[in-house]
Amino acid sequence: MVLLGSVRFFALQSVKARIPMIKFRKGAPGPHEHNTSSDAKTQRQAHPVQSSNTYSTEAIEDWQLPLRWRRRNIDIDEVDYINRGGPA
């Protein structure tokens, strides 16, 4: 039992320190920093951004699209190809 404990101790001693391989931007928060601070949230809510460009939130249906943006119809051969899962 003592021998097993000493093996674990030496195994832990030989492990190198972990160096992250991902390089983050200079202005970005670090990998351990999270945006959970309430100060940042209240600061964003205190000054809402007013945009001069307003976009419509209405969605258009597929039958309302111009011809150049419509999907083309699927051929019977394409339907068969899809249904059988690929090439025969």
Image: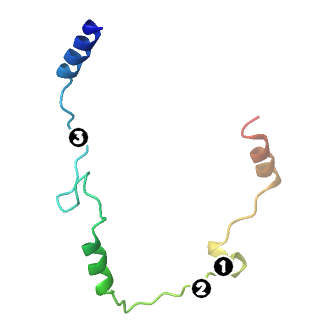
Measured in 3D between alpha carbons, the distance from the residue under mark 1 to the one under mark 3, in whole angstroms, is 48 Å
The disc, 1 or 3, on the residue closer to the chain's N-terminal end is 3
Q: Give the labeled residue for mark 2.
A: 58
Query: In front here: 84 or 68?
Result: 84
Callout 2–callout 1 Cβ contact below 8 Å: no
Amino acid type at circle 1 is: Leu
Horizontal side of residue 51 vs 10, given as left or right:
right
Residue 27 location in percent, x, y?
A: 18, 62
Q: Quadrant of the C terminus?
A: top right
The numbered dot on residue 20 is 3
Measured in 3D between alpha carbons, the distance from the residue under mark 2 to the one under mark 1, in whole angstroms, is 13 Å
Q: Residue furthest bottom?
A: 52
Amino acid type at circle 3 is: Pro
Q: Give the labeled residue for mark 1.
A: 65
Measured in 3D between alpha carbons, the distance from the residue under mark 2 to the one under mark 3, in whole angstroms, is 45 Å
Q: Is residue 49 above or below residue 63?
A: below
Q: Is residue 83 above or below residue 58?
A: above
Kindly indicate the quadrant of the structure image that contains residue 52.
bottom left
Residue 42 location in percent, x, y?
A: 29, 79
